[in-house]
Image (cartoon, grey):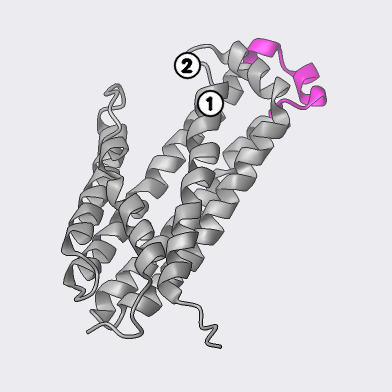
């Protein structure tokens, strides 16, 4: 019996697992616990849901570890198409991962500030304001990592587009997703009051591609 594991299906499964982990750790927790403009309420929410907050940190770590696995498997699949572009894909993820992981220190700082011994030192308003500061710093860190999450999608989209096996429309969708992340980062730092997250509308390629890989798998060699 042939029990060979298809690397395309492995990449697809790992890539899809990033969706629930990323939604929980990066999107759901901030929206559920952080009250914009209300430092005291935010501090209270995190204090009452500390375990969930810690789970979001763990989820963020898992996302980065899986990102490394995904890009290495995709490199194995796609590098015969264009080695330099495949290397760029790996480099961008390897830059994003340490940024995103170190960024979680801001969430750990929040937990430390909520320690009872520290709260005794600071007035509640001072402590909660510091907590809001670290949460805002964490958001900025996400956008910095997001720049490289966007950049890695461009060479991947190019490689998919050049593939003779994968539908070209998927490559186009991945390139569109790439621009979404990059534009979000630029807007966050240049126009912070602009309430628009473009990647919420351009991410479709990141769902279609792993689903396609999961169903179709990959060929042993691309040309």
Residue sitting at 48 percent across and 39 percent down?
23
Residue 205: x percent and y percent?
28, 52
Residue sitting at 48 percent across and 51 percent down?
18
Residue sitting at 27 percent across and 82 percent down?
222
Q: Is residue 192 above or below residue 96?
A: above
Give 19 or 190, whichever is nearer the viewer: 19
Q: Is residue 119 above or below residue 101?
A: above
Q: Which residue is mark 2?
A: 36
Q: Which mark, by number, is residue 191?
A: none
- Range of magenta residues: 112-126
Residue 91: x percent and y percent?
38, 68
Q: Residue furthest bottom?
A: 1
* Prevalent SS, magenta region: helix
Q: Is label 2 in a helix, a strand or a loop?
A: loop
Residue 127: x percent and y percent?
66, 19
Give 91 or 206, whichever is nearer the viewer: 206
Residue 125 in magenta stretch: yes
Q: Which residue is mark 1?
A: 133
Q: Quadrant of residue 122?
A: top right
Quadrant of the drawing holding the N terminus:
bottom right
Query: 107 left or right of 164?
Result: right
Quadrant of the drawing holding the C terminus:
bottom left
Q: Quadrant of residue 42?
A: top right
């Amino acid at each position: 019996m042939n029990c060979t594991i298809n690397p395309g299906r492995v990449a697809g499964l790992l890539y899809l697992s990033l969706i629930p982990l990323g939604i929980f750790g990066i999107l759901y927790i901030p929206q559920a616990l952080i009250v914009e403009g209300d430092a005291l309420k935010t501090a209270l929410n995190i204090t009452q849901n500390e375990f969930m907050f810690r789970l979001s940190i763990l989820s963020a770590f898992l996302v980065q570890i899986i990102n490394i696995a995904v890009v290495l498997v995709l490199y194995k699949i796609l590098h015969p198409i264009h080695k330099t572009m495949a290397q760029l894909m790996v480099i961008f993820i390897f830059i994003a991962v340490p940024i995103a992981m170190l960024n979680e220190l801001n969430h750990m700082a929040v937990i430390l500030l909520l320690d009872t011994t520290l709260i005794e030192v600071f007035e509640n308003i001072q402590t909660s304001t510091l907590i809001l500061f670290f949460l805002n710093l964490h958001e900025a860190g996400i956008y910095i990592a997001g720049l490289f999450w966007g950049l890695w999608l461009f060479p991947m989209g190019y490689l998919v587009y050049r593939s003779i096996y994968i539908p070209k429309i998927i490559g186009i969708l991945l390139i569109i997703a790439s621009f979404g992340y990059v534009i979000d980062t630029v807007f966050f730092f240049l126009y912070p009051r602009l309430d628009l997250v473009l990647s919420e509308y351009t991410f479709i390629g990141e769902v279609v591609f792993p689903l396609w890989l999961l169903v179709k798998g990959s060929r042993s060699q691309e040309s």
